Image: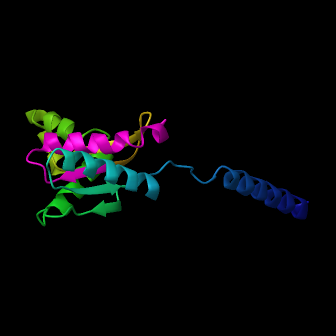
Amino acid sequence: MILRNKLLAGAALAVAFIASAGAQAPLAEKNVSMKMAQMIIDGTIEQCTKDGYKVSVVIVDNAGLVHASLRGDGTNPHTMEFARKKAYTARTRGQTSLEFMKLTDVPTNAYLRQIPDVVAVGGGVPIKIGNVTIGGVGVSGAPAGEKDEVCALAGIAKVADQLK
């Protein structure tokens, strides 16, 4: 009787383990590919060059890590780091960094600016598939954040067909 109970308990434990292991399937997440990042950078630089701006561009992936970057000719040294922070802000918040700036201009939301590496200035745009943010693009170097954002939007427009 004791042996039978031990066998039943062992079998029940094995079934429970197998059932829980089956529920642990790997995640399938969308992310920015290298080709997509290159196309966004090219489109961004193309727009800013046309507008007469020298900029740097940074693409962050789904995890908010730098996936690709380009420091434009004649840009100031700080533009790479500032573009990274704008891209990170857009990725983390799921909104443009200009929208984040407007959101945090309200005193009750100002505390959000304390999050490390987020910035409240235009030039960061989320890369989305539908409503799901899969990365961000940050641009720095134009004379105002709003102008940086125009360039970022032009870059994302180059891959719009892939974001459906």
Q: Residue at x 35, y 49 (%)?
A: 40
Q: Is residue 61 visible?
A: no
Q: Nearer the viewer, residue 76 or 66?
A: 76
Image height check: is 71 above or below 101?
A: below
| Residue 127 placement, left or right of 88 | right
- Residue 150 shown in magenta: yes
Q: Give the range drawn in magenta.
A: 137-164
Q: Which is the main secondary structure of the residues drawn in magenta?
A: helix
Which residue in the rendered view is the most extreme toward the front? 50
Query: Which residue appears at 15% of the width and 39% of the height?
Result: 146
Residue 110: % across, % down: 12, 40
Q: In this image, 79 relative to 160: left or right?
A: left
Residue 128 covered by magenta stretch: no
Where is residue 102, by image quadrant? top left
In-image side of 13 versus 162 (left or right):
right
Percent from the top left, x then y, of residue 78? 13, 63
Does the rendering let one see residue 2? yes
Please report the residue visible at 26 percent of the width from the left and 52 percent of the height from the top. Answer: 45
